[in-house]
Image (cartoon, rainbow, N blue to C red):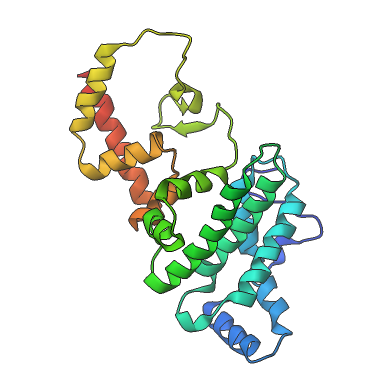
């Protein structure tokens, strides 16, 4: 299977029609007025959203046809709960619901067991994020979601981390055109007790030369393990900007450590 292609049995993905924003507004107006037959038209016109999200699970062992069906369930739930009067685009509202539905399926079918309390917080956080997005007009921060749910931010972060899929230690995490940095490069070998204090102090001094936003992004990316997309939503800037800031910070660290 091609890296950027999703093959679904019984679905000719090349012929899927994509609805325009005007068509969506008209269809939802008819659907909310009681014309239930347009529900399928809306769903078929948004199948490419489901397919685009499946690309995030290209490394998953789950059957892609099963994931597609689960994604469609999320799509139908989004259609039934979407209110166009809030002025939010359907795709903006729909994507987190499809993604959440697929992640729940993958997690619940995983050999890794997650406690019921973490699952409960995770499910509640999805709904809370949707409600806060509508109320605030932007993606809420983890602290805002935690306060909304009446829990500690650390408990929310634990629950969000439990939704993430396991990844290989050979997963590439950075490439500037030279040698690729893999996840295992960041894993400490605890059988070795030797600590290179020179490298430790060099890195500490190099970090001091970064600005506050660069420090935050490096910390969240390589210590907390957040993705560029998560930081993009949190800081309300594009993923491309996150990528540029991260690369600039890493280049600066490398230069200052070598000097």
Which quadrant holds residue 141?
bottom left
Q: How many marks?
A: 0
Residue in the picture at 65% in, 54% down? 102
Reply above or below: 102 against 258.
below
Reply above or below: 199 against 222.
above
Reply above or below: 224 against 126.
above
Reply above or below: 210 against 191.
below
The reply, left or right, for residue 64 in relation to residue 259 is: right
Residue in the picture at 25% in, 45% down? 213
Residue in the picture at 64% in, 76% down? 80
Residue in the picture at 72% in, 77% down? 40
Which quadrant holds residue 225?
top left
The reply, left or right, for residue 91 in relation to residue 220 is: right
Q: Is residue 5 visible?
A: yes
Q: Quadrant of the C terminus?
A: top left
Q: Nearer the viewer, residue 237 or 86?
A: 86
Q: Quadrant of the N terminus?
A: top right
Q: Position of residue 239 (x, y in %)?
A: 40, 51
Q: Position of residue 158 (x, y in %)?
A: 49, 44
Q: Position of residue 252 (x, y in %)?
A: 24, 31
The reply, left or right, for residue 154 in relation to residue 217 is: right
Q: Is residue 17 visible?
A: no
Q: Position of residue 29 (x, y in %)?
A: 59, 88
Q: Nearer the viewer, residue 214 or 180?
A: 214
Outermost residue toward the bottom? 33
């Amino acid at each position: 299977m091609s890296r950027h292609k999703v093959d679904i049995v019984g679905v000719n993905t090349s012929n899927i029609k994509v609805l325009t924003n005007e068509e969506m507004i008209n269809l939802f107006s008819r659907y909310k007025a009681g014309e239930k037959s347009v529900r399928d038209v809306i769903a078929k016109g948004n199948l490419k959203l489901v397919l685009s999200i499946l690309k995030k699970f290209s490394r998953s062992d789950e059957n892609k046809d099963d994931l597609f069906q689960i994604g469609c369930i999320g799509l139908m739930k989004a259609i039934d709960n979407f209110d166009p009067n809030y002025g939010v685009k359907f795709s903006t509202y729909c994507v987190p619901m499809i993604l959440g539905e697929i992640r729940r399926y993958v997690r619940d079918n995983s050999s890794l067991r997650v406690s019921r309390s973490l699952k409960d917080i995770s499910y509640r956080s999805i709904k809370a994020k949707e409600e806060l997005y509508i109320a605030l007009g932007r993606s809420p921060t983890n602290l805002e979601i935690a306060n909304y749910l009446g829990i500690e931010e650390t408990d929310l972060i634990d629950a969000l981390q439990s939704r993430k899929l396991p990844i290989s230690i050979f997963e590439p995490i950075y490439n500037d055109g030279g040698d690729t940095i893999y996840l295992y490069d960041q894993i400490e070998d605890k059988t070795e007790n030797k600590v290179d204090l020179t490298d430790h102090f060099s890195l500490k001094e190099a970090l001091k030369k970064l600005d506050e936003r660069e420090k935050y992004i490096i910390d969240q990316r390589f210590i907390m393990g957040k993705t560029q997309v998560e930081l993009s939503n949190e800081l309300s800037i594009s993923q491309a900007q996150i990528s540029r800031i991260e690369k600039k910070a890493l280049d600066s660290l490398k230069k200052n450590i070598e000097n």
